[in-house]
Image: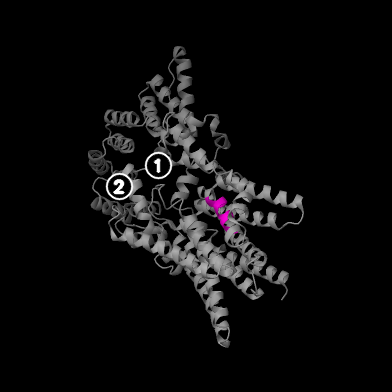
Amino acid sequence: MSASRFHAAALGIIVATGVLLYGHTLSFPFVFDDHVYLVDNPLVKDARSFVFNGDFVSFSTYSRRMGLDPDLSTNFILRPFAYLTFYINYALDGMRPRWFRAVNIAIHCSNAVLLFLILSRLLRASPKRGSLSSFSEGFIALGSALLFLAHPLQTESVTYVVQRFTSLGTFFYLLTILTWLLSNASESGTASRWFRCGSVAALVIGMLTKEFLFTAPFMIALLAWLVMDTPLKTACKRALPHFLCLPIIPSLIVLTAWAQHHGSASVSAALNITNPYGPDYQYHYALTQPSVILAYVRLILLPYGLNLDPDYPMCTSPLQPRFFMSALAILAILVGSWLWYRQRQRGVRRSLIFFSVLWFFLTVAPDSSVVPLPDLMAEHRSYLPSIGAFCALACVGDLLRTHFSHLRAAHHVIVAYAGAWIVALCAGTFFRHEVWRSEIAIWSDTVAKSPNKLRPLLNLGTAYYEHGKPVEAAACFHRVIQIAPSCAVAYLNLGKMMNAAGKFQDALAVLQAGLRHAPDDPDLHFELGVSQCGLGQIQEGEKSFKRAIQHRATHVRSHLNLGLIYAKSRQYEQALEYYRKADALRPLDPQSRQIVSQIETVLRQRKAGPVILSGP
């Protein structure tokens, strides 16, 4: 088969495999942070967000002031291009998951295609190619792409909609490298310049999509040095336009930290911009990451026990065996691959293996080093690094195949084993998708694997309640309180359930218990006010709503309820004041607008005679 026909067939296999593996997930619902960062995120639905509402400082603190997840503003500032793709999805089809998922699947398939094209070009163009056969080229390129495409570890970066940050960032990472390779290979100076500009543009857009693009210029220089046999100094010089883009991500982080800290920011504040736990967490996070990195390696080699929200143990001292044994293991992998590469530097496969090892550890570093993220471990963080692992495995497989070429059966056995592994990975991905089919399924699976972690239990309880299973939901929330008696969210969720069911007296007791642990929680005060009003204790409810506003001035629902209380008691000026405050924070719903209109009519016509205000 000619090279062009093989490439066309390989690309067809990659795309068809991706569609078959992921196509049936189009109807799956949004889950977990899809709601926080997409469905319930007002920034995604407002085009003004892309100019930071005209006030960068105010925008950087918007989510905190509105009582939303404080990371929403930070995340939007650092990843505006990814959010632009979400906004386009929303503008074209609303907040329906189908087309969000279709775009994610297309990105994942494109990443596998880009990986195949990069490896094919590298293996053909490398001065270290030697006598490498065309079969070896196809085995390594197609094998790596299919391993990456089919591995069940990737489901979190594709099926979990909001993790488009990761898959789209990887797309621009690979596009940066491919266009850079094309610029070096072009015989025409004009074409070379266009490809080089395209590579830098892809890098800049990628840096506005996901922070790990910071490592791309270094990977380009290492690729030129190790695989393309370019002197290191020359490689760095050729990658200079890419290196000049390095300040983009640190500048955005420092600027955001500066805005969020009232015009003053330090290196520590910038490094801890997503740290919700305090200064000790950064140190403990860094100590934990060597073992987390090895856990990613294990999941790549043996993908069992996949978990959306792992309850990973924290390492708190460098004297703990888990830290120094993991650090030694990582050092051994790096040194061992370097020594093996040194034995035969002219071999393209050994060079590619060493480069792939460096790829894995360098691309995992932004998420697994000294910048503390809220979760110690997350499977989607291995998406880009896994490319290095899959390339190394494909090269090792081809080296074994050629090493035992004197044995007739060796070639067929190794190729058959690689094919069987890919088929098994496809099956693993297909079955892994079953837990993403619903909120109850994904959180039931997570709770089974992380039984003592609070977040999966809280989310499973919420999922049960939303699907009309209040008994199961209450059991989850009570389990949370049993594990962590001071968890305010569990009391809040129980109180909400009871209020919704009209069990105001039971809700009152639960919410008061929660307030003993979290007296400053505005949501607990709000739900307590709902309970009190449900029991006819209007004055006490009024006080509770005011306490909620005292603790969070932007608590919209408290403003609305106070407006309603004053409207019903015909204190129209006070009612209008609270409704206008609520409207300034979030546009009023039609029912509230109707009440405001009636109040304004009353105030205009008060002198003309009595006007009766209808109920809401």
Q: Main secondary structure of the magenta part?
A: helix
At which x and y percent is residue 100? 56, 52
Amino acid type at image mark 2: Ala
Reply yes or no: does residue 420 show up in magenta.
no
Q: Nearer the viewer, residue 445 or 261?
A: 261
Q: Nearer the viewer, mark 1 or mark 2?
A: 1
Residue 407 lies left or right of residue 537; in this view the side is: right
For the question of whether residue 593 can be seen, the reply is: yes
Looking at the picture, does residue 165 appear above or below residue 596?
A: below
**Where is residue 260, by image quadrant?**
top left
Residue under label 1, please give it: 272
Quarter the N terminus occupies: bottom right
Question: Which class describes the residues within 10 Å of circle 1: few (<14), some (14-19), or many (20+)?
Answer: many
Quarter the C terminus occupies: top left
At which x and y percent is residue 433? 48, 64
Q: Are dots 1 and 2 in contact, CB under 8 Å?
A: no
**View extreme (bottom): residue:** 408
Residue 457 lies left or right of residue 338; in this view the side is: left
Amino acid type at image mark 1: Asn
**Residue that appears at 54% across and 32% down:** 53
The residue stretch that appears in magenta? 215-223
**Residue that appears at 37% across and 26% down:** 568
| Label placed on residue 490 | 2
Reply yes or no: does residue 217 show up in magenta.
yes
Q: Nearer the viewer, residue 180 or 456?
A: 180
**Helix, strand or loop status at disc 2:** helix
**Residue that appears at 66% across and 64% down:** 121
For the question of whether residue 20 can be seen, the reply is: no
